[in-house]
């Protein structure tokens, strides 16, 4: 018996698989740099001592990391709860109205351009193999790639916030007194630009816009906080 050549199977690695941890990582590091640098510059603007500035920065790092972890966990847990509720509802409908659910799946494939007869065959075969998985993926848009992972998001955000916040803190340690403000501001903006570049490259996106976006908003936040610190320091 002569068999045809076996098609070569190649693995594909799509960047969308990184979206869960990448979003939390970029958000955490970005917030760590901006919030800690802004806090440091605000305290420095009020003419505080270097020791007070460093203490405020460390407190900001710890509080911010805990806040990011808690916020991400609560937020992503809410998404997970919604997904689980939808899956439970779908599981019940599959048990009580299997034919209606099969027709619903068929209509989904027809709407995507599959011929009705073939769409029915696909729905039958996917239902026989994993009915809930088929409806979760094709009706609800829930898949292994996009499913909510609260603990992963919380740990990633806390860790990357701490790494981001460490950058302006390190600049405080190495900056001479008179150069503290420009070094922290300039160094933090550079770190934000690098973060924007890394996030874009990791996600496979165009680089320039993310870099400009993150540096602009970082500069604005630092300028406003420094200005408030100067005003408060003058008033006090």
Image (cartoon, rainbow, N blue to C red):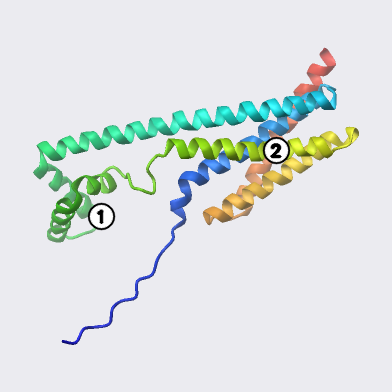
Q: In this figure, what is the number of numbered marks?
A: 2
Which quarter of the rendering shows the C terminus? top right
Q: From the viewer's side, name the closer residue of 138 and 18.
A: 18
Q: Is residue 102 above or below residue 33?
A: below
Q: Marks 2/1: CA distance?
A: 49 Å
Instruction: Farthest residue to the bottom: give it.
Output: 2
Going by the image, does 174 lie left or right of 102?
A: right
Residue at 27 percent across and 35 percent down: it is 86
Q: From the viewer's side, name the closer residue of 87 and 113.
A: 87
Residue at 78 percent across and 42 percent down: it is 186
For marks 2 and 1, give the one nearer the viewer. Answer: 2
The secondary structure type at the circle numbered 1 is loop
Going by the image, does 123 lie left or right of 209?
A: left
Going by the image, does 18 lie left or right of 32?
A: left
**Can you identify the residue that label 1 sits on?**
112
Q: Quadrant of residue 119?
A: bottom left
Q: Position of residue 152 (x, y in %)?
A: 47, 40
- Pick whichever of labels 2 and 1 is earlier in the sequence: 1
Query: Residue 193, which numbered label?
Result: none
Image marks 2 and 1: residues in contact by CB distance under 8 Å: no
Q: Quadrant of residue 92?
A: top left
Residue at 47 percent across and 47 percent down: it is 19
Residue at 72 percent across and 42 percent down: it is 189
Q: Position of residue 206 (x, y in %)?
A: 57, 56
Q: Position of residue 58 (x, y in %)?
A: 71, 29
**Can you identify the residue that label 2 sits on?**
166
């Amino acid at each position: 018996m002569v068999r045809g050549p076996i098609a070569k199977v190649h693995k594909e690695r799509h960047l969308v698989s990184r979206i869960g941890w990448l979003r939390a990582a970029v958000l955490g590091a970005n917030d760590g740099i901006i919030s800690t640098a802004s806090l440091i510059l605000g305290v420095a603007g009020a003419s505080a001592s270097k020791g007070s500035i460093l203490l405020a920065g460390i407190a900001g790092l710890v509080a911010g990391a805990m806040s990011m972890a808690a916020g991400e966990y609560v937020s992503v847990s809410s998404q997970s709860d919604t997904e689980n509720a939808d899956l439970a509802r779908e599981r019940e409908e599959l048990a009580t109205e299997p034919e209606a659910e099969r027709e619903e799946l068929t209509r989904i494939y027809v709407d995507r351009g599959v011929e009705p007869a073939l769409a029915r065959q696909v729905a039958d075969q996917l239902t026989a193999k994993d009915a809930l998985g088929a409806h979760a993926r094709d009706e609800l848009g829930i898949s292994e790639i996009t499913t909510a992972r609260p603990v992963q998001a919380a740990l990633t955000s806390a860790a990357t916030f701490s790494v981001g916040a460490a950058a302006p803190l390190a600049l405080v340690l190495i900056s001479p007194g008179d150069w503290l403000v420009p070094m922290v501001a300039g160094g933090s903006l550079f770190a934000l630009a690098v973060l924007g570049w890394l996030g874009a490259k990791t996600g496979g996106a165009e680089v320039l816009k993310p870099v400009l976006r993150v540096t602009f908003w970082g500069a604005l936040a630092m300028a406003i906080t420094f200005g408030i610190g100067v005003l408060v320091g003058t008033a006090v």
